[in-house]
Amino acid sequence: MKSNQVASALTLGLALLTGCTSHYSHKGPPRHHVVKTALIEITQESVQAQIANWPETSKLAANMMIQKYGLPMGVLPGMLVWNETGPFKRSIVIKDEVLHNFPTPHKDVLQQFVHYKVPADKLDEIGRYNGSILVDKTRGELSARCNNEQMNLLALNLAHEIVDKSMSVETARRKHSELASAFSMGSSDKYTNTLHFEPRSTTAFPDVEVKARINRSIRQAQEEEEEEE
């Protein structure tokens, strides 16, 4: 068991660091489909065993993802990972639920990422709109975390409209609440069906180097110490 977990960790780590994509493509997961990684095989049986004791919200999200996109690319204790599914760069289902009371109390378990550049002057507005919208400026990623993909699409679309200056934070929160309520009663909307923007891959911002200024006397002392050695 321990060796399998190590193998899974190494495989998942490589996938997340390199952004590797799965070469597996289909319209629905075959009953006996097997995803082969460099170190282990992830099967329907092994994934189901992994999530067997997960909370119901997490288990439901995992099974919905499997039904739509097939088996995950990476499996770790407490986490399943898919790369390059639909409009998303990465999707993660986590075992541990995160309580979120906006727009109504629910458990966040599915986090989905897109390539997106958020201007620095919009970070505060994004945070005030929805605490489960997360920005990674260095990677150039925007992610939403909720209990299903439709609510993540809704959150990402509204965040985009805030960045695009076409919607205020207050309007976005009100619209989110209205559309989420309608969705819970069986109604769908363009905001919950698809992204309203095209993710771009050139969004990373590695930042700029700032060289520390070292006091001349300190530097001289360091050089003398090095010479003595």
Image: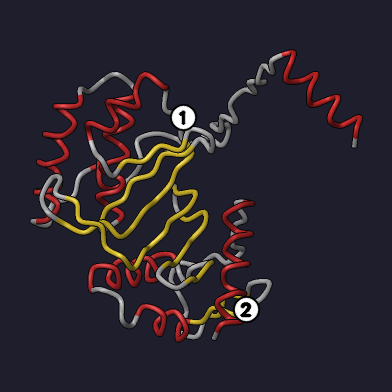
Residue 35 on image: x %, y %? 57, 75
Which residue corresponds to the image point at 28% horizontal and 48% vertical from the top-left?
Answer: 193
Q: Nearer the viewer, residue 99 or 168?
A: 99
Residue at the extreme front:
228
Above-or-below relation of 211 to 151: above
Q: CA distance from mark 2 to mark 1?
A: 35 Å
The image's colour scheme reads: secondary structure
- Residue that carries the numbered disc 1 in the rendered image: 117
Q: Residues within 10 Å of mark 1 (few under 14, many from 20)?
A: many
Q: How busy is the neighbourhood of tag 2: few (under 14 within 10 Å), some, or many (20 plus)? A: some
What amino acid type should be assigned to the residue bearing mark 1? Lys
Q: Amino acid at mark 2?
A: Ile
Say if 33 sits above or below 96 in the image: below
Query: Residue 225 is drawn in which quadrant?
Result: top right
Q: Is the C-beta separation of discs 2 and 1 under 8 Å?
A: no
Q: Residue at x 28, y 44 (%)?
A: 132
Helix, strand or loop at mark 2: loop
User: Mark 1 or mark 2, which is nearer the start of the sequence?
Assistant: 2
Quadrant in which the C terminus is drawn? top right
For image coordinates 54% across by 86% down, the residue present is 1
**Residue highlighted by disc 2:** 40
Relative placement, left or right, of 84 versus 95 is right
Residue 133: x, y in percent? 31, 41
Q: Along the line of sight, which residue is nearer the eye, 196 or 229?
A: 229
Q: Is 228 displayed left or right of 100 in the figure?
A: right
Q: Residue at x 45, y 74 (%)?
A: 29
Q: Residue 65, image x and y in percent?
A: 37, 65
Residue nearest the observer in this picture, 212 or 226: 226
Q: Quick check: 178 left or right of 133? A: left
Q: Position of residue 34 (x, y in %)?
A: 56, 80
What secondary structure is found at the residue carrying circle 1? Answer: loop
- From this view, report whether residue 155 is shown above or below residue 162: below
